Structures are given as C-alpha cells and as structure tokens.
Image (tube, rainbow, N blue to C red):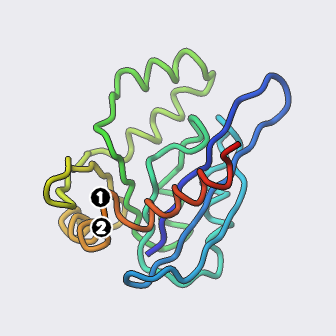
Amino acid sequence: MVGVDDGRFKKRRGGVDKTILVAVLFRGPSIEEVRINEVTIDGMDSTDSIHDMLKGLDFDFLLLSGATFAGFNVVDAQRLNRLLGKPIIIVIGEKPRDHAVREALKKHFEDWERRWSLMESLKPLFEAETSPGHNPIYFEVVGLDPEDASKLLKAYTFQGRLPEPVRVAGMIAKGLTSP
C-alpha cells in the first residue's frame, strides 16, 4: 500500500510556487520505498504528479491524504484510478465542511466549478473507526468496496488514528519542508 501527502508551503506573490508530494510504499508494517515529486500550489497538476511519482512501483492500493494537495490542487481520483489501475482511498482526518470549501473555491478560482465537480465526484463520504479510543476518520473510495476499504484502513493503522502510509508520508513531507 502506498500513502501520499504533501509538504508545507507559503504562497508568495508572483511566480509559480511549488511544494513536495511524498509517496511511501508499505509492505505490511515495513517501509519499502519513498518517492518525492513536486506539485504546484493551487495548481491542477496533482493527478499527473502522483501518477509520474508512482510509475514502475509495485503496489495494490493507494491512500491519499485528502482530495487536495498544495492548497486547492484537486486530484482527479477517477482519472488516477484509470491511469494506475489501482483502487484509491482518500483519507480525511476531519469531516469536511463542504459549504466552506465550495465558497473558498468560488472566491479564489475562476475554474472553481471544475475543482468542485472533481471533489463532488468522490461522494459519498464514509466513516471508519480505525483505532479504539480515537475519533473516527472519514474516507472516499474509487475502485473498491467501502467495507473492504474500511478494513484496510484499520489494518494499516498502527498508532493513532491515521493509516501508517499517509501518516508517515505526512511526517516526511512536513519534515522536508519545515524551516
């Protein structure tokens, strides 16, 4: 299973700003490989960036830490599923505030309808109890039964409530982009 998360970023005035995406391949509880690629802040290249980063990697499932990276760089999870031929689980730590997201997209992006439709294409939202004593996580799936996805999320959660592939990808990405 592969987990993907993005690094920290600050949007500057002028120019094209980038941050990193980190992919971590797990086999059971062990890390087998780490890959890094760039993604444009508030761009629309996250789908291609993830696809390019995972080329040639042998894995069964892809976990994404949310449906957006580097701000509002929305992943086309349906297209990514077709390109990779792998099921995708979008993991969300907190229940999304859809109205607030839609309003932010409307305010800041001319192509907000496209971004919003990519996010809406992932519905419905499911809930999973991954670890006793912790709040649930939320997830969306492409190419996999939600019950099977829930079992996978629980099986790969070793500490806390996030599955290890996205937890570790996030730690690496944030560590590499911290000041």
Residue that appears at 17% across and 56% down:
129
Residue 89 pos. (x, y %)? 37, 60
Q: Is residue 22 left or right of residue 158?
A: right
**In this image, 74 relative to 41: left or right?**
left
Callout 2, which amino acid? Thr
Q: Residue furthest front?
A: 179
Could you say which is closer to the camera, residue 121 or residue 165?
A: 165
Residue with the most extreme top position: 107
x and y, in percent, of residue 112 in the image: 55, 26
Tell me residue 43's x, y (percent): 68, 38
Q: Are marks 1 and 2 in contact (CB under 8 Å)?
A: yes
Which sits in the foreground, 104 or 11?
11
For the residue pair 27 and 51, the one nearer the viewer reads as 27
Residue 157: image tag:
2
Q: Position of residue 93 (x, y in %)?
A: 33, 46
**Which residue does the image show at 52% across and 18% down from the upper left?**
106
Q: On residue 160, which mark appears?
A: 1
Foreground disc of the pair 1, 2: 1
